[in-house]
Image (tube, coloured by chain):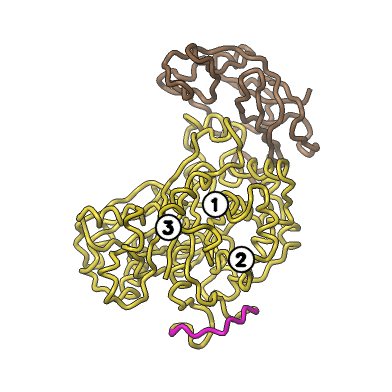
Amino acid sequence: MKTYLPSGLPKPVPQPDGLDAPYWEGTRRGELRVQRCRACRAWQWGPEWICHACLSFDLAWEAIDGRGTIYSWERVWHPVHPALEDAGPYLVVLVELPHAGGIRMIGNLLGDPHQTVTIGAPVDAVFESHEDHALVQWRLT
Amino acid sequence: MANLKDKYCIVGVGETEFSKNSGRTTKAMAVEAVRKAILDAGLKASDVDGMMSYQNGDSTFAPFVGPDLGIRLNFYMDVVGGGSSTEALIGLAIGAIEAGMCKTVALFRSMNGYTEFRIGGTGARSAAPVRGADLAQVPFGMRSAGQNFAMTFMRHMYDYGTTSEQVAHVKQAHSRHAVNNPKAFEKKRVTVQDVLHSRWICEPLHLLDCCLETDNATCVIVTSAERARDLKQRPAYIMGVAGRVSKPRVDYHWAHGPISRVAGYYAKDIVFGQAGITPEDVDITGSYDAFTFTTMLQLEEYGFCKKGEGGHYVSSGIIELGGKRPNNTSGGHLCEGYTHGMAMVVENVRQLRGTVDDTCPGAAEGKHTYDYSPGKCRQVKDPEITMNLGWAMPATGSALIMRK
């Protein structure tokens, strides 16, 4: 299983109350889902029990178009975990999603870690398979 | 605290050595720092009846430190937190005294920030499972403070044309201050070029854009202006305080709104409103310089320059000793040592007293040369008002304005 970062990072543990389960189910099926308020139609990330725009508890999960743009980025050289000892450099991007109200998500930018990265560049969600979950990564389009 | 302006003071300060090998427990260090602050204030141990501290599961607790010092506490509280806690706790100490719960409060932070708990996800922290908001960052290799802030810096450069060279001036200035601070851990002048040629930690942050990691304990003592009158030191009067002011979201702060807006944007109206002054009235700033650019961001957000002009401000000479408004005259976290913000309050108290511990022969009596060349003076001439800009992360900040 080829992954962008080496194995050994702490395993994601979905919330025991099931709050973010629709997100993780979606990623396994190649679908990017985020919450949207049924009352005021606001999008939000991360997952919460309440809409932080209108305070309604009536939230739905919607699959969204995985196209976005790079809002900011960083190239990591110094390892911050034993599993990342020889992993640097690698790229982390903050991606803005215009099809979901402009909310932003963090992921890795696939490809050459030494590449020139441009704020505003268009990217597309890629679903990276792991043993029992999938991570949403990004590639330039 | 508009009606409490000037009614409370910092009357004692103390600290242990800044090192990378304390070889001591956080309790032993806290006891030393609090003892030194009590002696500095000219208080008896039994005069202190309140104690507070902050920590992240990495330190001792106030009720264990007090009794070692012969103090029976009427009030204690240990809170979770790192940066931005000092100023917030000073405000809470005023509240506790005002409520009649106690009369004099010692605040401390004690941490083996190098030998026990380093920054980031190393050591025991590396094995912890990833839950909650961490799920959105940690699986992508983003968990350290530097990584959390680098995105903000990168976007600031894009939005405002800020450069690495401009913010490197912060390290250059603070290193010049530290050379004149006998207790600074890193007493070596560093140039802008040194910063730019140091290795990448997380682009756009170089190694020398990042603060030190040290073992240290630090203490400040808060009491009423009335109680302060017959104590040993000239009191540093508290004009205004704002504590743990936050952005609309603290977790996921990067998911919504402008990323280079930090909490100081919201804190400034509270703290300047209480003090009844403007940034122009401040003689010395003490920023939370976890990184070079965090200093720049705070100075911008508190209104020392216009938003987007922080790069110019920090590279103009204003922030250096001898400049219009020196910042972190001790060398700060970048050069003196790292104890989550309290040491910069200690430094400003000493500046207001006029007794900064430089190498001027008469420093303890307030006689200084004001010669800021290497190894000499770091006392600012007759400062009236200082300000501390505390921060924990882009989304949380605290501030304190003091006068002599």
How far apart are labels 2 and 3 at the CA level? 27 Å
Give the image location of residue B205, x and y in percent: 67, 50
The chain assigned the colour brown in the figure is A
Q: Which residues are magenta?
A: B365-373
- Specify the amino acid type for callout 1: Tyr
Q: Residues within 10 Å of mark 3 (few under 14, many from 20)?
A: many
The residue at the point 19 percent across, 57 percent down is B74
Give the image location of residue B294, x and y in percent: 59, 51
How far apart are labels 3 and 1 at the CA level? 14 Å
Q: Nearer the viewer, residue A15 or B378?
A: B378
User: Dots 1 and 2: beta carbons under 8 Å?
Assistant: no
State whether the magenta stretch is mostly helix, strand or loop. loop
- Mark positioned earlier in the residue sequence (3 or 1): 3
Residue position for label 1: B302
- Mark positioned earlier in the residue sequence (2 or 3): 2
Dot in front, 1 or 2: 1
- Specify the amino acid type for callout 3: Ala
Residue position for label 3: B275
How far apart are labels 1 and 2 at the CA level? 20 Å
User: Dots 2 and 3: beta carbons under 8 Å?
Assistant: no
**Chain B as rendered: colour:** yellow
- Specify the amino acid type for callout 2: His
Mark identifier at residue B174: 2
Relative to B335, is B58 above or below?
A: above
